[in-house]
Amino acid sequence: MTTLTRRQLLGTGAALGTTLAAGALPRMARAAGGEITVTAFGGVWEEAVRSCFVAPFEEKTGAKANVSLGGPAQWLAQVEADPSDPPVDMLIMTPDLALAAADGDLVEDFTVEKLPNLAEIPQQFTDSVKGKGTLFDYGVGGITYNKQVVSEPPKSFAEFVDRVAAGEFIASVPSISYAVTPIMLIWAMAEALGGGVDNVDPFFEAMAKMKDNLVFWGGPNDFFNHLSSGEADLGIYFDGRTWNHYDSGAEWIDFINPEEGGSLNGVAVQIPKNADPLAWDYVNEVLDAQNQSKFAKIMNYGVTNKNVTYDEVLATRVTPWEKTVFPPYAQIIEVRNEWVDRWNREIGG
């Protein structure tokens, strides 16, 4: 079996001081002073991080949080290059790279003693990265469609496959160059069609049936362009991005969580070993219900604190994580290279 090493994961990317003693109490609302470096993606992500997490952290601690823009592979490479003095004090990670960091013993264990707000995060999100971090927000890979063209959209992956294969629709699906494709498409569709991480034959059989009616997107904007231009009628896409397009004026777009459940694609937060202890204060703000509520409203994505209450509009958009399928991230890592090789042989680039 081909497995991804930490180096190989860093190559694929994603699109990616003093530690507290075990059991020590976190130093919340410490005296003024100090400076840490936190991470964020660019664009609206950066704006949301600054307003939802950096601002309350700085107000409560009197410390400063500098924001390093980039991606998970870059940040993990930086920590791996200098683990005794990491240049960033917290990490925003895709689950595969979060697991690479955990397996490499590069990051801290998360406990309620260190992070009081962790008690409000369902245990599944922490367990998914082996307790060395937790997921704080997520998107769901489901069926996005053009309402002006598709009056009765498929309600399930199985129906999606049958109707696309029959030529009723042209579908846009993520290509293998997109980092999350093994989770949101290969595994999710295999699982929905009776397979799973140990048997992706149902996925490849479905792709063979649909091949004459498929186009592929390499980035999220490609998908939107496919639907807006009429090149495709529907496809596999994320809920949050769908609603961002809607709010930007594309009111013809809509999203369905398939009956089998779309894949939950989470974003993890971690703390490198030897990071500044202030990182615990910052991550506690990331896990705070009020801060996550604000973040969700900006980003149109679900968040993981169980005490978050979405407003009326967002409540109709966010897919509850209990209605998704939770990917076996660690198992997918072990077979991901095999899936990519098979895709290249049977489907192409």
Image: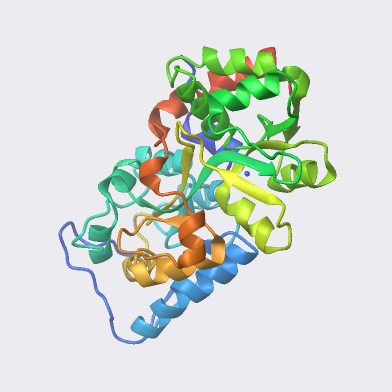
**Image height of 256 relative to 310, above or below:** above
Name the image quarter holding residue 41: bottom right
Relative to 314, residue 139 above or below: above
- Is 153 in front, or is 341? 153
Q: Nearer the viewer, residue 277 or 117?
A: 117
Describe residue 62's horizontal placement relative to residue 47 as left or right.
left
Picture quarter containing residue 142? Answer: top right
Looking at this view, name the residue that lies furthest to the front.
151
Residue 244 visible? The answer is: yes
Indicate the quadrant containing the C terminus: top left, top right, bottom left or bottom right. Answer: top right
Left or right: residue 62 versus residue 348 is left
Does residue 221 sit above or below 191 in this rendering? below
Residue 62 visible to the viewer: no
Point 42% across, 65% down: residue: 310
Tally of marks: 0
- Image location of residue 186, percent across then percent down: 55, 25
Foreground: 55 or 318?
Answer: 318
Is 43 left, or right, of 123 in this rendering?
right
Residue 28 x/y as whole percent = 26, 76
The residue positioned 65% from the left and 29% from the top of the image is 176
Q: What's the image's color scheme? A: rainbow
Residue occupying the far left of the picture? 23
Which residue: 28% across, 81% down? 30
Residue at 58% over, 43% down: 14
Which percent across, then down, holds residue 278? 34, 71
Residue 265 percent location from the top left of the image:
48, 43
